[in-house]
Image (tube, grey):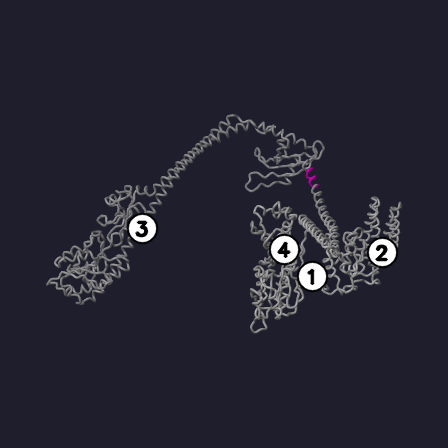
Amino acid sequence: MPVTKNRKPCEIKLLRRYQRSLLLGGGALLSLALILCACLAVWTDIQDYIAESRAVYTANKALVTQEIEKKQSAMRRGIIYSELVWRAAGSQRRVDDFRTGQLLMQADPYVVSQLLLGDVSPRHPPQTFARFIEFSETQAYAVTASARERGESFAGYFFDPAHTFVSIASPPPAHALLSNIPSSDVRRLIDRLAPDIGDLNDPVYLASLRESRRVFWQPPMPDPLTGETVLQVAAPGFDGERPFAVFVSSISFDVLYKWLHKSSYSGNFMIVDRNGDLILSSWSQDAVDPALTTKVLDSGVWQERLDSSDYVYRDGTFTISEPLADTGWVFAYAFSWRTILAARGNFVMAYAVATLLLLGLLWTLIYVYLKKVLSPLLLRSQRVFDSEKLNRTIIATAPNGLCLISERSGKVLLQNAAMTLYDNDEAPLSERLRNLWRENAAQPLPGATVAAPAMHELTVTGADNERHHLLISIVRTRYLSEDFLLCSFSDISERKQLERSLCEARVAAEAANQAKSAFLATMSHEIRTPLNGILGNLELLAHTPLTELQQDRLQTVTRSSHTLLDIINDVLDFSKIESEQMHLEHIHFDLIDLVEQALVIFVPIAADKGLNLYYRVAPQLPRCYLGDPTRVRQIVVNLLSNAIKFTARGKVSVTLDIGPAGEDGKTVLILRVADTGPGIAAARRRQLFRQFEQGDASVARQYGGTGLGLALCRRLTQLMDGVIEMESELGQGTVFTVRLPLQSVGSALALPGASVGSTDDTDGSAREIGVLCASSEWRTQLFAQLQAWGLKGRLLQGPEEWCGNRGPLLLFGAHRSWSTADEDALMEDGLQIIDGREDGPRMPVRQGNRILVSCYSLEGLQRALLLAGGADLPRPALCTHVHGDAQVALRTDAARVLVVEDHPVNRELIGDQLDLLGYDACLAANAGEALQLYAADQYDIVLTDLSMQGVDGYMLARMLREQGARLPIVAVTAHASPQDHQRCLAAGIDDVLLKPMSLREIDRIMRRHLTASRLRSSQVPPEQRERGLSARLLQALHVSSDDALAQMRVACAQQRHDTVLEQLHAIKGAFAMQKQAPVVSACSELEHDCASGLPVDFFSRLDQLQTLVHQVLKRMAQKVAA
């Protein structure tokens, strides 16, 4: 349906006329505004110039006035001083020197010289000038002081009112000029020098001069003495009411001119006397307006406003003038339009050019807008009317649904065919869209003219009676002065189906991840179990008589097996980290002992390659920390193994240091492993920490390995919130630095009873220890540690240097340049020698006066020092929490061990290992057999596998604990996650032993739990075993029995004869532990009949056994309830 009527062609023409008129008229108005703004800016600038000129005039007038006042004040002070000096004058001292009427006098080398001239005649003998002569001599000091104060030379003179005497203070050229003047010419000279200061014979005039102290300023004139143009200042000095002298001071013409010439403005500063004669002008030859000064003087405008500082404008000239102090002169400043143009011409020109450019730009834009915008816009407007019908056609054929709905009435103004496909009569789609908008109306964004589209999902039943999912977009808009809802939608039924498929895929992925975790645990168990058989039997084989060739091959097989185990451990650990199954322990551990154990492992490997292996620990490093010792050891071993593997010559250094503590109280442990290997190229460093990658393609061929070591170190470090860094340079080696934030426990290892200055000898030699060490690396570690322990080490070159000392001698390192005979000589004298070697024992061993100890044992060195000093050795410090009876000696007779293992190879292996260690082992193939053996005999400890068929190790431990067993139970498994450890603790299992197990590990775990206080006493007497099951354990027995019966049915169908026998044996053992003879008899009978094969009626007999088991369990449950 049409929504607008066709516009007439005249409407477009009228629109074109209006737009052109508005555009051109607006351009004209903007042009006029630009011109007016430019004129206003120029006028404002000129007014600013006039105001600034007035300010410049005021400032320069103040400076000139200040200079004049300064000169006048100085003149008045000098005259007042002269009057005071004149009253005291009267000496006849220099009268004889003045007989000729001329005297060149300098009272002191530091004062100005004076030329005294007098009209000496019989009428005026020299004695008449005696007072003037003495006055002149005194006056010289005042004149010199005043000149030095001002920092300028003094030029002036004074004469008496009768013109018979004159005193001139002048430079030497003036002396030569006047030396030839006869005394008869003195009057004429004074007449020529005397300025006009009025009638000095008029008493009234003299009284006014004496009262006002007026200073007379003379216009610039050539100095009669020097010929230089100067200004003269004159004033009379009075003796009472009569003047006794007239003082004249010459002032350089530049004193005033310098202030006027400083101004940067183009106007002219002038000083004019009352007659209109120009005294001073600031303009020189390069005047901006040469006629300006003449015009001002001729017009007399300078004397119109002498009482105001406002300017007078006449004939294009601006003039400001005021009287200049009491000099009788006028200070004036004049400037004209020409000077203004000279000062502001660039500004005016810039405004004019800018205005012309703006006008040009404006009309260019108008022209471009008219041709490029307006005309095409009008053309497009014409096309809009023509395309309205076309747009409606496009909307009608759009694949998505489109409609325009009145928000007020709900009337559909426009809709396409796609809209009708999803409409029905029962619930009109337009009404549902309108209600959906009202329920979730979109609010307009701040500053937006329209609201943002509201997106909704709607499920509708279309005209085809099928359900469809629609994605609706609704926005409010204005059309024909009314609010409308513009709605569009698309069918997203297929997308919804895809989302359901993705959800199912996510569930499948989670299930796959769980399967991966289960696979990881299974593989860990299935791989380690046969490895346990391989490594255990190899270890047992090593204790049998073999030829050298057989021993060599056995060691090769053992090393290969351990290498395989290391690879498997790395892969499994990395898989745990990748699947986020790696959990860290938080237990006490001895960090220094951990690192030293790793070092001892690699000492023979480094020695075989000819490498020096050094070890340094910061003396202040705490010994014990809270953390995961297994993972820390893994990092240390991996880094140390790589360093030794890739270093052909030189040395490998391991350093332990401590960093500053963080806000959480944890200290930063710094582990640094450095080598002198080939180094790593910069291009290879990035990939070094990637899994299954090594520094070079040839590395795997030359050295082997999986490429997981450094990647695992990095992941483990990150798990512990630490960082690992690498520094390497080709040909110089590589340094790996690991920083781990760990909580320290306790303090650094100390030396009991040792401190600096603690000695029993008067000479203090007991606190000093002689040190023989050829390696600088060992010396650095050794002396730092001795100093931390309060001991003083003295470095020696040979043992003979320590003769006569009673303190111990410490030998450290394998490189020794002295002979053993020198050592033996010292020992014969009773001297204690501590022999520290790389291959020495970790705990000190005394051999006469020689104490052997390892270079890689800090505690061993401490105990060796105490042993050499005759002190009691403390018990070794333990960081880990061990059982309280772990240190108690074992019984002398063999301990009885109950071993429960369903795998026959592993069962026999554990039995052989225990026999070799001296334990009495009793072997059980499953939990039922184990319960029977436990009930029939006494045991000291139980070793049980966790993953057994039927009743597993957890259930077996619960059964034993429910029966009151207090003996230690140790789980033997190939895989134990933190969750497994928690399950073990909950089931009553004391410890976990991981496969593959070495003889040392088995012996360590046995010694930890088998102590004198627990042997035999842990066994419960038979009379105390008659206890019923708990409800929880009864439920577990019920579940395990049903599971065993179900497995037997499946095994029978698959003809797995051995599985049937194993499950029967498990059920028999479980019920034998509970003294349930009917079930035990039935299981024994069926087990006997199945020995040679499964009977034909096996399933019916299995049903009878299941019924019997359920009846027995029901009776047991009634007993528990009672």
Above or below 440: residue 211: below
Q: Are marks 1 and 4 in contact (CB under 8 Å)?
A: no
Badge 3 element:
helix
Mark 2–mark 1 distance (CA, rounded to whole Å): 38 Å
> Amino acid type of disc 4?
Ala
- The reply to whether the magenta stretch includes residue 967 is no
Q: Mark 1 against mark 4, which lies toward the viewer?
A: 4
Q: Of the residues under marks 2 and 4, which one precedes in the sequence?
A: 4
Crowding near the residue tagged with mark 1, few <14, some 14–19, many ≥20 C-alpha atoms within 10 Å: few
- The reply to whether the magenta stretch includes residue 500 is yes
Mark 2–mark 3 distance (CA, rounded to whole Å): 127 Å
Mark 2–mark 4 distance (CA, rounded to whole Å): 58 Å
Using the image as rendered, state which of residue 557 and residue 799 is in the foreground.
Answer: 799
Mark 1–mark 4 distance (CA, rounded to whole Å): 34 Å
Residue bounds of the magenta highlight: 496-504
Give the residue number, with chain letter if any, for mark 1: 881
Give the residue number, with chain letter if any, for mark 2: 1072
Number of the label disc, if any, that sits on residue 606 = 4
x and y, in percent, of residue 474 in the image:
62, 37
Give the residue number, with chain letter if any, for mark 3: 58
Q: Say whether residue 41 is left or right of residue 1107.
A: left
Mark 4–mark 3 distance (CA, rounded to whole Å): 96 Å
> Amino acid type of disc 2?
Ala
Q: Mark 4 against mark 3, which lies toward the viewer?
A: 4
x and y, in percent, of residue 686 in the image:
59, 47
Badge 4 element:
helix
